[in-house]
Image (tube, rainbow, N blue to C red):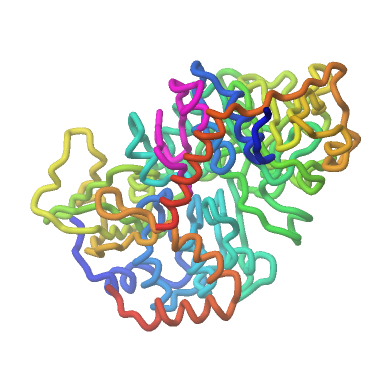
Amino acid sequence: MSLEFTASEMMSVTAARALNNGMTCFVGIGVPSEAANLARLTHAPDVTLIYESGTLQTKPDVLPLSIGDGELCESALTTVSVPEMFRYWLQGGHVSVGFLGTAQIDRFANLNTTLIGDYQAPKVRLPGGGGAPEIATHAKEVFVTVKHSNRTFVKDVDFVTSVGFGRDGKARDNVPNIGKGPTIVITDLCILKPDPETKELVVTSLHPSVTRQDVVDATGWDIRFADNTETTPEPTAKELEILRDLKARTHAHHAK
Amino acid sequence: MAEFLSLQEAVSRHISDGNTVCMEGFTHLIPFAAGHEVIRQGKRDLTLIRMTPDLIYDQMIGAGCAKKLIFSWGGNPGVGSLHRLRDAVEKGWPNKLEILEHSHAAMACAYEAGAAGLPLAIMRGYIGSDLPKVNDQIKFIECPFTGERLAAVPTIRPDVAVIHAQRADRQGNVLVEGIIGIQKEVVLAAKRSIVTVEEIVDDLGVGVNACVIPSWAITAIVEAPKGASPSYALGYYDRDNAFYKEWDTIARDRDTFSAWLNDNIFEQGAA
């Protein structure tokens, strides 16, 4: 008998499964933080989580609302200054995975968190880059998780805040000291990976009961599917239980 | 040596119209009480610098204190937009706001370079990003030793730094604990500094490697209990996450915001 679960839960569980014990993960707020902590509470208890507020190897009991909640500091191995965080730990090459969310992503996995529209006269002003522009290039690889819609998945982002593979797919070619870039994008519909040659995002796995047409309808470019597109495994009862507990604890904590 | 002042005196003496002001604290220890006093004293044309403008600058921008904002992430953490910042950028209310935006890494480096007395900060950054196209303060230089292309940004050397910390001793030495952000760097980078603290104690009672800023590196110290609320002070009180959520409703509408400002800032005296 199959379990009841939402598309958001499917996304979080699938994103969590991308992490493993050997990784040192620089965590963005939102779904990446939910997924990273779910991984830590399930199959990857020894994954090292780092937040840009300077908290190294943190194990929060509830998900932080902000990147610098007290919970992150109190449960961390140690807390360093923000310049040290970015210079020694990130730029210094100690981060294996940067885990990011975004407002827009394009076919070459470039991320836009700056604005919608024209820079001088924005239609919607978004928060901006934060740590992401350098996380995207210094982490050995980047995982992206974001809900799938054709407002989010656009052919070309309005603004490249954090580079995936550039406007032509070649932005990382011959650049010294740069990470591999996005290696996986996890949405509430599917998993996408960059084509090894062109770097264009291709669907490699569809979540249970999601059709190709669902993905086509929610993507702003002519999306391609891998020859051997798989079906993403469903969440287990254990994963769902731990995720729901974590979210309930978090909700109760922030309502105080 | 740092001078002990009231909040009202410290702000009126050390912050003037047109100054460049950094009120820092990375999510933790945000000097809200001082920001509210700046609003009450009606300071104008400030160039405000902060990595994350947060609610403190949303309030100051909405109150008309700022002409320019330099920042790296302008959202309400975990909640959404800073509506007063957006209204100023998108609609020019209550006045036009010039913005200059960086990444966190660049601002952290710029503060550190400011503390180090350098004219610029060098980093490996902004690769492939459009930010250098819209911020003429981001340049690229070639490493003279390896030839690698590196990003350079000007140092941050503000007129005034304002931070909050847990405590000062009676000589004015200050302890910062927890998420220390760029508190030390911004004080050392600034011409003048105001440090608000939760309490003044006889002995800081700290280990040998604690983050302590010596009295002689600080201009003014102000005792301001709960001076970082609704952000938090580790060991004193938690972040008021419920207020951060509530702010979304307050700040979304100009009238609601103006009423909040009147009731909570103008009608309240300085601490």
Q: Residue at x 40, y 77 (%)?
A: B264
Q: Which residue range is magenta in the image?
A: A38-66
Q: Residue at x 63, y 64 (%)?
A: B86
Residue A240 sits in which quadrant? top right
Return the residue nearer the eye: B154 or A77: A77
Return the residue nearer the eye: A44 or B190: A44
Q: Is residue A175 visible?
A: yes
What percent of the width, then of the height, locates residue A197? Answer: 83, 17
Q: Is residue A185 left or right of residue B188?
A: right
Image position of B123 with respect to B46: above or below:
above
What percent of the width, then of the height, locates residue B44? Answer: 49, 74
- The residue sitting at the right extreme is A222
Image quarter (top left, top right, bottom left or bottom right) of the N terminus of chain A: top right
Residue A85 sits in which quadrant? top left
Q: Is residue B38 left or right of residue B4?
A: right
Return the residue nearer the eye: B249 or B48: B249
Q: Residue at x 43, y 37 (%)?
A: A83
Image position of A17 with respect to A160: above or below:
above
Q: Residue at x 14, y 47 (%)?
A: B204
Q: Is residue A7 left or right of residue A86?
A: right
Image position of B50 with respect to B117: above or below:
below
